[in-house]
Amino acid sequence: INRIGVFTSGGDAPGMNAAIRAVVRAGIFYNKEIVGIYRGYEGMIEGDFEEMDVRSVANILQRGGTMLKSARSKEFRTPEGRQKAFDQLKNKKIDALIGIGGDGSFTGMHYLFLEHAMPYICIPGTIDNDIPGTDYTIGYDTATNTAVEAIDKIRDTALSHNRLFFIEVMGRDSGYIAINSGIAGGAVSIIIPEEETSIDELVEKLNRGGKKKKTSSLVIVAEGGKSGSAMEIAQKVKEKSSYFDTKVTILGHLQRGGSPTYFDRVLASKMGVAAVEGLDQGKTDSMVGISHHDIIFNKFDDIMNQPKDIHKDDLRIAKILSI
Ligand code: ATP
């Protein structure tokens, strides 16, 4: 492998820049040429490429977002779109790919591998931490810290007015950001997609808190929950109990931005180096992951048909601490 194309795809996540930097620098360290591909699969289809050197990635380690930009591409979902992308890669003599993104991006690379034998390694970059085969994805730690900071601020105003706040956090179908920002932010209840939540039980719990003269309560709601959005849950609670002055805050895209934490920078740096080394050692159709501090590689077929369950102990601890 001589020339590696690097790109970011799907939702952006803090730490993607640190991963790009690590891929470029490790590539140069191992005497590879690195080509940056702009705007994910969209730029791949259009041939929006740029040769990268050590200086192309100076001063990006601490920045949120992605300097290569990200996109979602409908055309790449079709075999014709992938043929166009492959032709562009061949033209540029790119003989392997490192893509940083979520499960959709990983699936796209897998198809390119099956149809055109393009070697690749996926680096998991998404704030949702919803990809099996790794303890952590790049961006999750930063997004959770951002959520905790926001929760702390909302607690100040909740306390001052004896209010009940429903705070909606991101995570798509995964409750990782919710459960851990909820534990760290001292939530009275955490509603996640992985668990059924009974509104009656929630009301009962909030009432118990009210009777104990709890002066404020924070309920964290994961955006993808089966019980509805924070707005809907707050409405249902209001209907069943006139006890509370309820407010809803949706944290939204602020969780995507900002300077990555040390954890995400180090994770991205390790994964970026490992991806280059993995390709060099003949690994392909795989994702780099981290398990108990060690770098691991998993084949697409071995992990992508499995759900990523929430850590059972997180649930247990959240319940014990919110009595
Ligand atoms: P995030 O988790 O942050 O949303 P993601 O990588 O899962 O990131 P998606 O929008 O699902 O984001 O996927 C990114 C791109 O990958 C899509 O726009 C599409 O071009 C490609 N892709 C996704 N799924 C497939 C698929 N089944 N076949 C081919 N390409 C796909």
Image: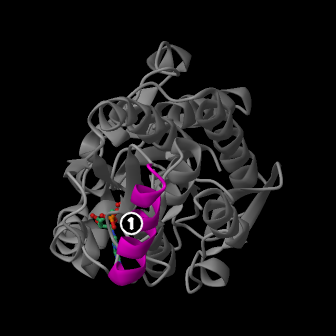
Using the image, determine if residue 21 lies above or below residue 318: above
Front residue of 43/217: it is 217
Would you name the residue on which mark 1 appears?
207
Res 135 → quadrant:
bottom right
What residue lies at 46% left-to-right and 27% top-to-bottom? Answer: 52
On whether residue 223 falls in the magenta region, the answer is no
Q: Position of residue 49 (x, y in %)?
A: 32, 39
What residue lies at 51% left-to-right and 43% top-to-bottom? Answer: 185
In the visual, does 245 lie left or right of 217?
left
Front residue of 167/106: it is 167
Q: Main secondary structure of the magenta part?
A: helix
Q: Secondary structure at mark 1?
A: helix
Question: Mark 1: which amino acid?
Answer: Asn
Ligand 1 near label 1 (Cβ, under 8 Å)? no
Q: Position of residue 261 (x, y in %)?
A: 57, 29
Ligand 1 shows up in the quarter that is: bottom left
What residue lies at 72% left-to-right and 27% top-to-bottom? Answer: 29
Residue 32 shows in this picture: no
Using the image, determine if residue 34 lies above or below residue 86: above
In the image, the segment drawn in magenta is: 199-213
Q: Position of residue 94 (x, y in %)?
A: 48, 50
Front residue of 172/218: it is 218
On whether residue 208 falls in the magenta region, the answer is yes
Q: Position of residue 163 (x, y in %)?
A: 28, 45
What residue lies at 38% left-to-right and 45% top-to-bottom? Answer: 216
Quadrant (top left, top right, bottom left, bottom right) of the C terminus: bottom right
In the visual, does 270 lie left or right of 200?
right
In the visual, does 131 lie left or right of 109?
right
